[in-house]
Amino acid sequence: MAGIVLKARFPRRHVVEAVIRNVFRYLFQGAARNWARNFGSTAPALSSMTLLLFLSGLIGLTGFALNNLEQIEAGQASMLHVYLRDDADPTDVFTLHNRLALDPRVATVDYTSKAQALQHAQSVPGLPQLAGASGSNPFPASLDVQVKTIDDVAAVDAMARISPAVDPVYPTSYDRGAYQRFQSVLLAVAVAGIVFLGLLGFVAVTVTINSIRAAIHSRRDEVAILQLVGAPRWMVRGPFIVEGAITGSLAGGAAGLVTFGLALAGIAEGSASFSQFAPGVTVTAAAAAGLIVFAAGLGLGSGSSLLSVRRHLES
């Protein structure tokens, strides 16, 4: 009878709700209070992690822009301009055009006349003065060949040069080393960025681990009592991991907001020049970078705390 009364008085749903509420209070509210109380020891980890995540956001956006720029440069480098002689035989030009168009390595072939070349040069700084100084149209007609892959540009260039319709002095726009030099610069920047982020990450993780170790040391009596009464591991570890997650989420939130704000300011201040300098960096990309920075902060704080808890509670 007592069991029936107890079940009626405390239905299972209320018991589950009470357990969840108590777990929430113990893990999250208690961890938040301890985090605020130990802010002095947490502040170095918070500041170093914020700096790391902020720089990671900027480097990530820069890498995204450089990747888009590399693709644009690759597309431009795979565009081969075959310059034609002013006195070229139309039959030779037609033959070269057909040969290039039927080549499986070529995507498209377009013809640009001398008048069209002059008109295009009017929009390029410095070229209108060149045309005016010469007194005539110095720009040749050309076949603009879009090669499918940049690796085939050299072979297509060699094939086009042998045509009698091609200008013998300046046959094509092909520059063997230009794209390779650009790729080498991008690779060097990427390696430097990764090494720099690795060093900052090591510092941030080390400082976070030390701050959690200080928190464990300051509450060693509480931890010892919990271990003596046989408390499960999640009750001992949980608050410290939540404290690390709080540190990481605050650092990630601050760094994500600053990253998004700087990108938004750059987009708003110079939309045309910014899109050329950082192609593909839009408001959506900036917002995504901010969210990724926040998630990285949460993971970095929680992971660093877990490493510290495992090392110092089980040693």
Image: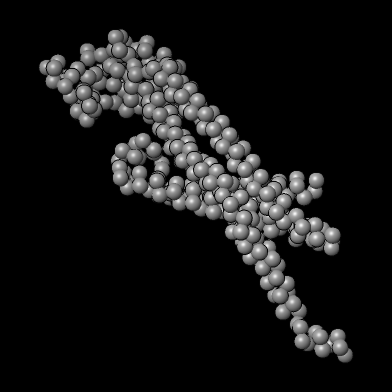
Residue nearer the viewer, 269 or 234: 234
Q: Is residue 114 left or right of residue 152?
A: left
Residue under the image location 44 percent in, 48 percent down = 258
Q: Is residue 294 left or right of residue 172?
A: right
Residue 265 in picture, x, y percent from top left: 35, 47
Q: Is residue 196 above or below residue 169?
A: below
Residue under the image location 48 percent in, 22 percent down = 184
Q: Is residue 83 visible?
A: yes
Residue 241 in picture, x, y percent from top left: 67, 54
Q: Quadrant of residue 66?
A: top left
Residue nearer the viewer, 230 or 67: 230
Residue under the image location 69 percent in, 48 percent down = 213
Q: State the quadrant of the N terminus.
A: bottom right
Residue nearer the viewer, 26 or 112: 26
Q: Is residue 103 visible?
A: no
Residue at the far right: name it. Answer: 1
